Image (spheres, grey):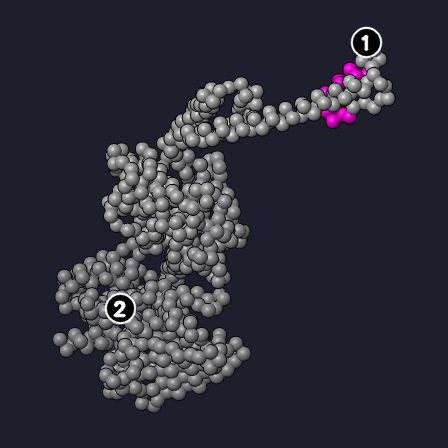
Amino acid sequence: MTKIGKEITTWVEQRRKNPDLPLPKTDSAEMQPLLALIDELEQENRKLRCRHGAAISYIRGKVDQLLEVIGTVPLRPEELDDATLISLDPIGIVSESFRRILENSRATNDKLHLAMQEIKGILESVGGGVLVLDCHKKIVSYNQRCCEMMGWSHENGTDRSCRDFICRGDHPQGCVFDEMMRTGRLTKGSYCGGDGQRHFDVVASPIRDSQGTIVRAVLLYHDITELVEAKAAVAQEKERLFFTLASIAEGVIATNRHGRISLMNQVAERLTGWRSSQALGRPLCDVLQVFNSEDQHICLDILGNVLLEEDPEQVVGSNATLRSRTGEKLFFAMSAAPILSQEKSVAGAIVVFRDITKEKKLEEEMAKSSRIESIGQLAGGIAHDFNNLLTAMLGNVSLAKMMTDCDSKVHQLLSQTEKASARARDLTQQLLTFARGGNPVKSLSSLGELLKESVDFSLSGSKVRCELTVAEDLWPAEVDQGQFGQVIQNLILNAVQAMPEGGLLRINAENRSLDGRSLVPQVTSGNYVQITIRDQGPGISSQDINKIFDPYFTTKELGQGLGLAICYSIIKKHQGTITVESEPGWGTTFYILLPAAGADAAAADTAPQVTETSAGKGRGRVLIMDDEEVVRDVAAEMISFLGYEVVESCDGEEALVLYAEAMESGRPFDVVVMDLTIPGGMGGKEAVQKLHELDPAARVLASSGYANDPVLADFSRYGFKGVVAKPYGVEGVAKAVEKALQEQEED
């Protein structure tokens, strides 16, 4: 190959790669004809290419028109290239196009079928009823679950209004489809079946076309009938539980497993001082302030043991102190138990508690009462024995006093001893009243004298000054002198304690006649003696004044709360009343009303005094029965001093034997004095019955160291003619014996 040939070959290869490459420039005469030929060929080639492109475009356009006529889409260049397009005839082109379309259609149909099967599977497995509606509420499709929920047969078909199947012809309020169409958004609602027995949750979701217009809607129905019924049952149970908790006397608090309050009844609200709305969600220990006897907060300990994940404990009967939100302290009994879930895990705790403050106070009062009863029994025994000793002392002193000259120093000393013995008798009377209470042994008495004696005794050594005013014509009254003295002394003692720095105590005794129009409560018409005791102490608060006479109520740090309760009991047993008026800062006033015996009864208790001139004038035989030898001896001395023949016995059996022997001998006893209480033997209460079987006319006097023995208060009912209460002196026994003998003469 020549040099020119090589250059031309190189240029042709480069020109293939770059068609725009210009012809090579050369001055060679040999190349000029060749270059001119190449240039001519290129121009012809350009013309041919232009005609070829136009032909292909023409043919492809016609083919596309043909395909469009037969209802298919135009062919894309990658589906039918230019070479194939030029080489095929029109029928071939259409055939090839259909072949390609059918291949694509089969693939698309397979995908559509798979998609439809997936959608069907989803609809059937969704768990709810699916209903597809068009924009006019016509049913387009639905799943099997929808048929089951609505009670349709699957042959009901489509293209019918949902109102015919769902709403049963009614237009329901709050239709979720209407709301979805109005808002254009996913809408939720509820629906009650046509029979009213089924309940559904409904979700309506819009389906839009390419222009955004809602053309269909998918409605998803969930059957919530069991849930609604369960909620109704829970609501009913909750209501029943509410009324149950509201009707019980115990406080009930429930917590979750974290110890926070989830439920609280009204009693718990009252005891803790927390309203339920305030307490819900709070830790239990913030509301239930529980303390043990050592003032330690124990709520956390109790709750922690109950809420243990493993082996939770149950607390039963725990007694503690509860401090309410208002600061009030209560004694209460508490029980706590875990609340277990179905899986037996701890879901919370239930705490039940009740106020036992009254029971606690009652226990304390019973314990106090038991102690007081024990002390009372001891006091009663002491008083009984002391009265026996006082009988010996007072009897001997009264005898010695009668054996001395009235103007002698010895007589004066004996008189003082006699007064001291009488004071000691009053003390034993108080011991007996404290020990046993009982009915008063009444006698006609001058209350003015008793008031003066009580004032002198009670204010001895005190800084308090007393103004005692007694009406000159004050009516006498039937009272137990010992018990009445105890009432006055208790009231004076309260006044002295109310005025520790001293003050003025005013006591007034006057006559009062009351009728049916009287403003004094619980008092019938009649004549009364009114005693008023007014101090200058600090007074009594309004919340305490109504409890002032309650047993064991006291405002004193070391008080027992028995003094005023005993006063109230004694006055009531005298058919009287005792009331109180007080105002803080203005002192306290007690009013006592006692039935008066009448103006002409004052002389009833004025029997002549026994003096040494009356000694030895008594006539008759007297039998004395007493287990205490010292009492028998002094009684025998006093009665013998009065001139009576005396025989002694130590118990009821011996007295009955002696009385029977005296009757058989023709020298019966005129009077018998019997001690009521004979330890280990027959006392006077039993012996007098047997004695009346021997002699229905027997004159028997009752005697006892228990001056408030009920037999003494109603002696005639037990067969006695009179009473000789210990301790007694010559004057006392003389009056009793002479009165019994007078009745014998009158009979």
- Image side of residue 531 versus residue 698, left or right: right
Pick the front one: 502 or 389: 502
Quarter of the image that includes the N terminus: top right
Q: Residue at x 75, y 18 (%)?
A: 12
Residue 478, position in %: x, y? 28, 78
Farthest right residue?
27
Disc 2 + disc 1, Cβ < 8 Å: no
Give the mark toward the camera: 2 or 1.
1
Amino acid type, label 2: Leu
| Residue 356 painted magenta | no
Badge 1, how many Cα within 10 Å: few under 14, some, many 20+? few
Q: Bounds of the magenta span?
A: 7-22
Residue 239 relative to residue 689: left or right: right
Is 58 situated above or below 718? above
Report which residue position mark 1 lands on: 1
Residue 301 position, x and y percent, is 51, 45
Q: Quadrant of the rendered structure where residue 415 is?
A: bottom left
Figure quadrant of residue 525: bottom left
Residue 9 belongs to the span the image colors magenta: yes
Q: Residue at x 27, y 77 (%)?
A: 522
SS at circle 1: loop
The image quadrant of residue 216 is: top left
> The C terminus appears in which quarter of the rendering?
bottom left
